[in-house]
Image (cartoon, rainbow, N blue to C red):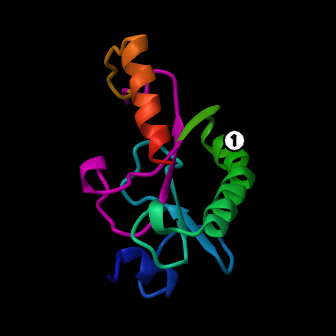
Amino acid sequence: METIFDKIIRKEIPAEILYEDDHVIVFLDIFPTNPGHTLFVPKESCENMMCTSDQALAHLFSVAKKLAPAILQTVGARDFNFITNNGTVAGQVIMKTHFHFIPRFENDGHKMWGHVTASPEELAELRKNIQSKM
């Protein structure tokens, strides 16, 4: 399925592109969570991380590691989140693999995920069930 990211890759719509090579494109998010919110998009056609090749993901992470210091220095941040929303229940809106690089600031108002408590027995049982499917 055609996405807005495909149009950005083909330069059919404008974007503030920070980096591009044959395998990945990196550009500023037009609806940033914080200044410097950047999207890392493999050019490989795939809906989400689960079908993206290991090579594309490895390259994307390598590029992110190289660009992170420049983004952080520019916006004056030290910390960041680097995340993907995989599927609609997880919040994925654009159905093409992409990762959000979000600089974080002290007291920026963005909360982390909630937590539940799991007993050691529940964790052990879950581990066994997951390992049985690997």
User: How many residues crowd around disc 1 within 10 Å: few (fewer than 14), some, or many (20 or more)?
Assistant: few
Q: Magenta residues?
A: 82-111
Magenta-drawn stretch contains 51: no
List x then y, in percent, for residue 44: 54, 78
List x then y, in percent, for residue 118: 35, 16
Amino acid under disc 1: Gln
Magenta-drawn stretch contains 99: yes
List x then y, in percent, for residue 81: 52, 39
Q: Quadrant of residue 54?
A: bottom right
The residue identified by callout 1 is 73
Q: Residue furthest front?
A: 132
Q: Quadrant of residue 48?
A: bottom left
Badge 1 element = helix
Quarter of the rendering occupied by the N terminus: bottom left
Image position of 94 with respect to 85: above or below:
below
Give the residue displayed 36% in from the left and 55% down from the top: 31
